[in-house]
Structures are given as C-alpha cells and as structure tokens.
Image (spheres, rainbow, N blue to C red):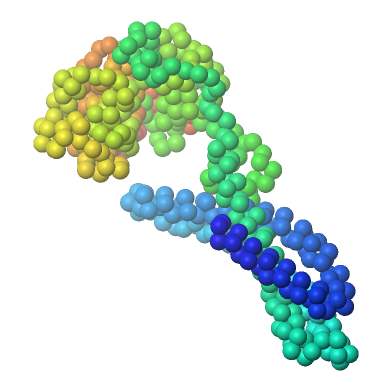
Amino acid sequence: MPYIIINVLHYLLSFITVILLVIVELPLALISFIVAPIYYRIYQFYRFPARDLKRLNSVSTSPVISQINECIGGITTIRAFGLQLQMLREHLKFLEDSAKCYMFQWFANQWVTVVIELLGCILSSAITFSAVFYTINKKINPSTASMMISYANAIPMTLGLLLKYFCSAEIESIAVERVSEYIELPPEEKGTFKKVSDYSPRYSNNYGKGEIKFINFTLKYDISNSDNKSDIENPLNESKEHAVLKNINLNIRPGSKICVCGRTGAGKSSLFNALYRFYEYDGIIKIDDFELKNLSLTEVRSLFGLIPQDAMLLGSTLREALTCGIHIPDEEIWNVLETLQIKEKIKERKGGLDMELNLGAVQFSAGEKQLLCTCRALLRKAAILLVDEVASTLDQNADEIINNIILSDKNVTVLSIMHRLQNCSRYDRIIVLNHGEVAEDGTYDELILRRGIFYDMINVQK
C-alpha cells in the first residue's frame, strides 16, 4: 500500500509539471484539455466495478486456499477413504470460480488501459501540433518545441499509470476493509463479567451437581456464508439454516457416565458446541436447574472440563497451560500428573512445571499433549466433564488410564463422544445419534439386544 501511494504522488507531480510547462510555452494546447472531463468520467466508471471485482476475487480465492490447507492436513484420511477424485472435483470448482473473477478483473484492467492510452494519444497529438504551429510562426524556437513534444509523448503513459495506481490504492484497501469487518463483528455477548476464576467450579458450589437436561432442543447452523459458499453462489446473502440437531429431549442424572456415539455427521460434536453456547439454539438446556441462556458466557464456559480430540496447550509455560490462570498448588498438579503416569517425563525436562512451551507445544508428542489436556480438565474439578474422542492419539495403555480415571469419580458427570466402541460397555448409558436425532438410548446390553444402529456399528468395528 505505501508503494502504491508513493507511485500515485510521483505520477501526479510528473503530470502537473508537464501541464505547467505546456501552459507556459504552448497556450494553444489548452484546447486539448477538453478531454479532462472524459478522463474523470472514465475514472468514475472504472473504480466501482474494479473495486467489486477485486472483492469478488479475494472472496473466491479464500475457499481455494482453505481447501488446500485442509487437504494437506487430512491427506492420510483422504487417501484412506479414497476421496481423491471428490476433493479434486471440489478443488476444480473453487478454482474455476476464482479464475472467472480473476479474468473479469484482468479484462477490466485491459479495457481501461486501452481507453486511457487512446485519450493520451489524442492529448499528445494536440500538444505536438501546437508545438509545430508555434514553431512555424516563430513564436518558440525548435529546441523548445522538441522538448514540449518529448514531454507530450510521456503524457499517455503518465496518465495511464496515474489512473491505474489511483484505482489500485482504492482496490487494495479492500484488504483493510476485510480486516475491518472482523474488527467490527458484534461480540458474542455484551456486558461486563467477572473473571473466569470467579466462576470456576473450584471456587463455587452453585453448579456442583452435574445434572443436564435437554428439552425440545434444536440446533441450526446458518450455511448462507460458510467457507465453501462464497458471495458468488449466494449474491443476495440469503439466510439458509440447516438443522443439525432436532427436537432432542434428554435427562442426564448427576454423576452418570454417558457415551455419545453415531456415524460421521450425526451431530455429536454439535451437542458439545451447544453446551458451550457457540451457537444460538431453540429449546432449553438446563444445568442443575439453571437455564443455560440465563447465564453469561463466562459462567457457561466455566462449568465444564473438556478433553478435546485435537490436543492444544495454550500458555507461555506448562503451569499456565495446565491451570489456565487459576492458582493450584504444585502438589495437586503433580498428583494428577502422577495418576496419568506422566509425572516422571515432566520432571526429566528442564524447568519442570515452569518449562517454556514452544509454539504448538511441539516438544511434546501428540499422546503426551492429550494426557496434559486430560490433566488440565481434571484440575478444574468441574461437575461435568466433556470428552471428545481422546483415544485417537493414545496407545491402549494411556487410553485405559484415562478411562479408569474419568469413570471412577462418582461425583462427575461424563459425556464422552466415542468412535472406537470397545470401551463403551463401561458406561452407564449410551446415546446413539443419527441425522441429528436420538435414534437409540439405553445401556450397552439393551442396545445390543435391540440389534439396531448401535449393534451394526459394533459389528462393523469387530
């Protein structure tokens, strides 16, 4: 952007200098400046479409880049399921949309270049004829006329570049506009709240039972402007809502251990998203008789302990990553680490709990990060623990350790999303989701006897 502004000033001063020389030496050439309003009309005609074409080009390029990153990250999964052709077709579609927008932008640039060069040639020719006329009538000497003609020949290029750089300055501000859109996004919730630690279950017994109720609960996602649906496909920005969870009615008693399972896209992760109030929903969710919508987001998100599928440690030190800013005695942290059988590995590292974490905590393996995330969740001492398929990065021994810990505490309600169903028989209750609805609900033995969806899933994994 600074480079473009410097070029605008450079060519603007060059043009003004040429005009002043022409006015002083060739007054007759002023007639040629009747094309000035035409230049202005061309600028006004070009700037708005050019800006919108740049915006469309930026919007259409985003899905291409996003899909490339997704493919790189999930290349093994794509190959495992043989989805190479499907991903290629999607990529070509996004690429075609991006290419169309780029070509229209290129056509607009070429059109304005031709028109500006043509008008510049008219202006240059008028100045040249004026110089010849004044030379014949001996009003200026030939050397002055030659200088005027040489300056006149530079006018088409100077005007063309001036217009293009001036428009480019406005077009490039689209990037600033896109950043501004994110800055001006409405906050999730207005108001002033206390610190997270003030609402932490470690310091409050207001939400200590762990009972969860879903009453006529429905969750819908707005897909009108998702990453794969650009403004090209949805120019009117029409709202399109897709119900991912429909009319859910569940009563989860305090201290119960619930396994949530179902095929891909059944709505398992959406259930967790709703508990954290990442999205607005219809119906009622109650935590210990407190309606979730009546609590601030700060309170809501302090009610749960979470063991995520993708382990992530945030903080400059390991202590910060495990405590999340809450003061917890070292002895308590070491006890939990010892229970998870990772205490010795931490002690062997320089700094212990105060070791500095690199970006992404790359000094730990995926399995170690998962165990540390489990430690973080247990240190919160929340009455409700959400577990999202932790077995994906753990060996059998570590998986057994975590399951033993989370299932042994009778005072903690556990909701666990599971794809590997070998441990689900240890849970009190199994909820099977299918197409956003509760398809089956019961104990392990009950669902096996029904020979329904759960029974089929068990047989497929065997």
Closer to us: 425 or 305: 305
Report the side of 252 relative to 167 (left or right): left
Q: Residue at x 72, y 84 (%)?
A: 147
Position of the C terminus, as image quadrant, is top left
Vertically, is 72 above or below 399?
below
Q: Residue 196's spot in the image, x, y percent?
A: 39, 20
Q: Residue 160's spot in the image, x, y percent?
A: 70, 70
Q: Residue 441's spot in the image, x, y percent?
A: 39, 20
Vertically, is 284 above or below 421?
above
The quadrant holding residue 24 is: bottom right
Vertically, is 133 above or below 353?
below
Report the side of 378 relative to 442 (left or right): left
Q: Residue at x 18, y 22 (%)?
A: 330
Residue 170 at least partly seen: yes
The quadrant holding residue 288 is: top left
The mark tally for this picture is 0
Closer to us: 444 or 251: 251
Position of the N terminus, as image quadrant, is bottom right
Closer to us: 1 or 358: 1
Vertically, is 173 above or below 432?
below
Q: Residue at x 19, y 30 (%)?
A: 353
Q: Residue at x 44, y 28 (%)?
A: 273
Q: Residue 242's spot in the image, x, y percent?
A: 57, 34
Residue 438 at least partly seen: no
The quadrant holding residue 342 is: top left
